[in-house]
Amino acid sequence: MENKIIRRRISSPCRQYSESFKRMVVAEFERGPLNKDQLQEKYGIGGNSRILVWCRRYGKLHYPEKGIINGRPMKDPQKQRIKELEQQLKMEKLKVLAYQKLIEITEQQEGISILKKDVTKQSDRLHRPTPEK
């Protein structure tokens, strides 16, 4: 009979960490100087994503879920640009409405007119045609 060498993978048993320990590690991670890998080595924490899972659960900062994207990018760059410009236009319209409301409230409270009236005279220099040579 042949002797077969069977190798067993030696792994550490699944450790369970207390909630206070998890919160302490997350707080240290969010504070700063050590990154995820350094904390894993410091405390002997196994697994590649364990600390990140704890951060999502116990952390104060925003940790986006892995693999979540904000929609599929458009294939046509012109359509993408149009969509971006439409979003910008929508935001600018909201700003204009906010400024108009602010002006209206200020005029009511202060009793003064802030906007110029349409009947104001414009400078004659603006309407003069340029001499042709």
Image (tube, helix red, strand yellow):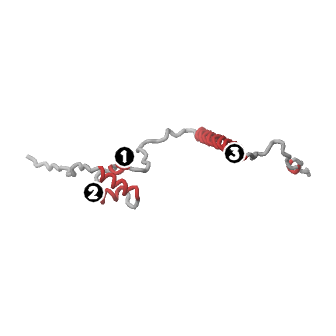
Q: Earlier in the sequence, mark 1 or mark 3?
A: 1
| Residue 127 horizontal side relative to residue 45, left or right | right
Residue visible at 86% across and 50% down? Answer: 123
Q: Earlier in the sequence, mark 3 or mark 2?
A: 2
Residue visible at 29% across and 54% down? Answer: 45
Residue 57 badge: 1
Three-letter amino acid code of the residue under disc 3: Gln
Residue 62: percent from the left, percent from the top? Answer: 44, 48
Identify the residue position indicated by label 3 in the image. Answer: 109
Circle 3 crowding by C-alpha within 10 Å: few under 14, some 14–19, many from 20: few
| Residue 38 horizontal side relative to residue 5, left or right | right
Three-letter amino acid code of the residue under disc 2: Gly
Closer to the camera: disc 3 or disc 2?
3
Give the camera-side residue of 80 and 30: 30
Circle 2 crowding by C-alpha within 10 Å: few under 14, some 14–19, many from 20: few
Residue visible at 40% across and 61% down? Answer: 33
Three-letter amino acid code of the residue under disc 1: Arg
Identify the residue position indicated by label 2 in the image. Answer: 44
Residue 18: percent from the left, percent from the top? Answer: 27, 50
SS class of the residue under badge 1?
Answer: helix
| Residue 88 horizontal side relative to residue 131, left or right | left
Q: Earlier in the sequence, mark 1 or mark 2?
A: 2
SS class of the residue under badge 3?
Answer: helix
Circle 1 crowding by C-alpha within 10 Å: few under 14, some 14–19, many from 20: few
Closer to the camera: disc 1 or disc 2?
1
| Residue 116 horizontal side relative to residue 131, left or right | left
